Image (cartoon, rainbow, N blue to C red):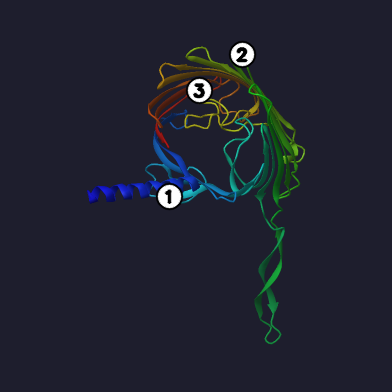
């Protein structure tokens, strides 16, 4: 009986401590293992394995302070040694891709550090920035001011050189270190921006971002960039419209201003959800790598054309359809066509097209099996590409 009481007391104490801890620190994350196959006509029949574990930390104080961070464990490709090959910035088995501190009071939220940054999959998504941000939220309104430090360098650095000096005693020469002004390393690169988000109703929302880039690292490459994203829902139809602009001076003196935009529609009819996208890019504009499908964009192992707009001015159209066969199993098919005004760098010529698909099966809550495959062809001399991968993922 005493043992039962002791065990019950210990369990209650542990549960109490866990409750206190969970009110202060939240943990979440995901882990996956993948087998990848790629045949792009250059590297034939390449098979690789990779895996990773990610854990998110979110802690807050009673006074409104908080921290957020994410740790990544052994994020890399198998067979490259005990340290793996990091798939992103980092040179160790355990590293963090963002960590920042903040303070919330009323409707205001001030935060700074290495932060995840996202506006839309088209314009900017899943980036990491060194940022100071002030956010104001009131109901459906969100207004954020941000300052990003991109590059920090001194301009006139001093250096030490050896100068031959004649000795006054015996006429011989010796080398004497002399500090002189060295070559300019360049200036700073900073970004100041404002993001406006407004949810007018359940049917309409608008997001606007405008940023000024001040860049004098090598020359005066300063300018404005921005994007407007409009979302609408009515009668079971969902529509997204986005238009983006980048000042050419950001990239080089005299460069053309860049434009790009797209429209998307989707709706659900029973177990089928069709999706249609059309869009364009001109004068060097490229979309974020997460925008796309499986072979064109999408930022997945099957991707062959990394960004929409790569290779020249582009018109594109894509049709997808998701079929939810059961609560656990779904299939998706994609058909994508691009018309590229080839500037000489388009990997697959003027008219590449993609046929791809995926199968997704939920083994249980937070446990998923995923298989994806795609074929990319064109009217150019480039060989067709075929890529596929299978993934086992756990989320908690």
Extreme bottom residue here? 169
Q: Residues within 10 Å of mark 3 (few under 14, many from 20)?
A: many
Q: Residues within 10 Å of mark 2 (few under 14, many from 20)?
A: few
Q: Secondary structure at mark 2?
A: loop
Residue at 40% x, 22% y: name it: 328
Q: What whole-number distance in Å separates the C-alpha atoms at marks 1 and 2?
A: 50 Å
Q: Residues within 10 Å of mark 1 (few under 14, many from 20)?
A: some
Horizontal side, residue 113 vs residue 42: left or right: right
Residue 50 location (% of width, % of height): 40, 38
Say which mark, if any, is on residue 235: 2
Horizontal side, residue 287 vs residue 81: left or right: right
Residue at 70% x, 52% y: name it: 188
Q: Secondary structure at mark 3?
A: strand
**Which residue position is annotated with label 3?**
376
Q: Secondary structure at mark 1?
A: loop
Residue at 53% x, 29% y: name it: 298
Q: Is residue 25 above or below residue 175?
A: above
| Residue 363 visible to the viewer | yes
Q: Earlier in the sequence, mark 1 or mark 3?
A: 1
Say which mark, if any, is on residue 93: 1
Residue 72 location (% of width, % of height): 46, 45
Extreme top residue here? 269
Q: Earlier in the sequence, mark 2 or mark 3?
A: 2
Question: Residue 329 or 222: which is nearer the viewer?
Answer: 329
Q: Earlier in the sequence, mark 1 or mark 2?
A: 1
The part of the image, by quadrant, that contains residue 267 is top right
Quadrant of the image for the C terminus?
Answer: top left
Q: What whole-number distance in Å separates the C-alpha atoms at marks 1 and 3?
A: 35 Å
């Amino acid at each position: 009986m005493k043992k039962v009481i002791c065990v019950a007391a210990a369990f209650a104490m542990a549960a109490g401590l866990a409750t206190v801890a969970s009110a202060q620190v939240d943990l979440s994350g995901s882990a996956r293992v993948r087998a990848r196959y790629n045949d792009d006509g250059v590297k034939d029949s390449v098979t690789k394995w990779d895996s990773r574990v990610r854990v998110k930390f979110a802690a807050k104080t009673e006074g409104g302070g908080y921290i957020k961070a994410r740790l990544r464990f052994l994020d890399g490709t198998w067979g490259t040694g005990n340290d793996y090959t990091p798939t992103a910035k980092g040179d160790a088995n355990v590293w963090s891709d963002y960590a920042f501190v903040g303070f919330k009071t009323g409707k205001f939220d001030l935060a700074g550090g290495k932060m995840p940054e996202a506006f839309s999959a088209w314009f900017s998504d899943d980036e990491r920035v060194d940022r100071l941000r002030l956010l104001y939220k009131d109901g459906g309104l969100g207004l954020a001011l941000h300052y990003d430090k991109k590059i920090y360098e001194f301009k006139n650095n001093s250096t030490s050189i050896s100068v031959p000096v004649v000795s006054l005693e015996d006429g011989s020469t010796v080398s004497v270190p002399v500090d002189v002004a060295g070559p300019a390393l360049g200036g700073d690169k900073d970004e100041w921006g404002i993001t406006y988000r407004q949810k007018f109703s359940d049917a309409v929302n608008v997001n606007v971002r405008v940023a000024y880039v001040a860049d004098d690292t090598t020359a005066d490459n300063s300018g404005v960039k921005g994007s407007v994203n409009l979302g609408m829902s009515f009668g079971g139809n969902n529509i997204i419209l986005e238009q983006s602009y980048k000042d050419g001076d950001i990239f080089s003196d005299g460069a053309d201003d860049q434009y790009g935009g797209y429209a998307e529609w989707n709706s659900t009819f029973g177990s089928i959800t069709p999706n249609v996208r059309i869009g364009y890019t001109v004068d060097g504009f490229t979309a974020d790598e997460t925008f796309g499908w499986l072979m064109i964009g999408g930022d997945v192992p099957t991707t062959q054309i990394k960004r929409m707009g790569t290779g020249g001015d582009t018109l594109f159209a894509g049709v997808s359809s998701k079929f939810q066969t059961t609560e656990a199993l779904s299939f998706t098919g994609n058909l994508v066509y691009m018309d590229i005004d080839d500037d000489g760098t388009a990997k697959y010529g003027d008219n590449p097209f993609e046929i791809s698909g995926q199968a997704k099966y939920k083994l249980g809550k937070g446990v998923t099996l995923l298989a994806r495959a795609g074929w990319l062809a064109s009217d150019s001399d480039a060989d067709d590409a075929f890529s596929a991968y299978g993934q086992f993922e756990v989320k908690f």
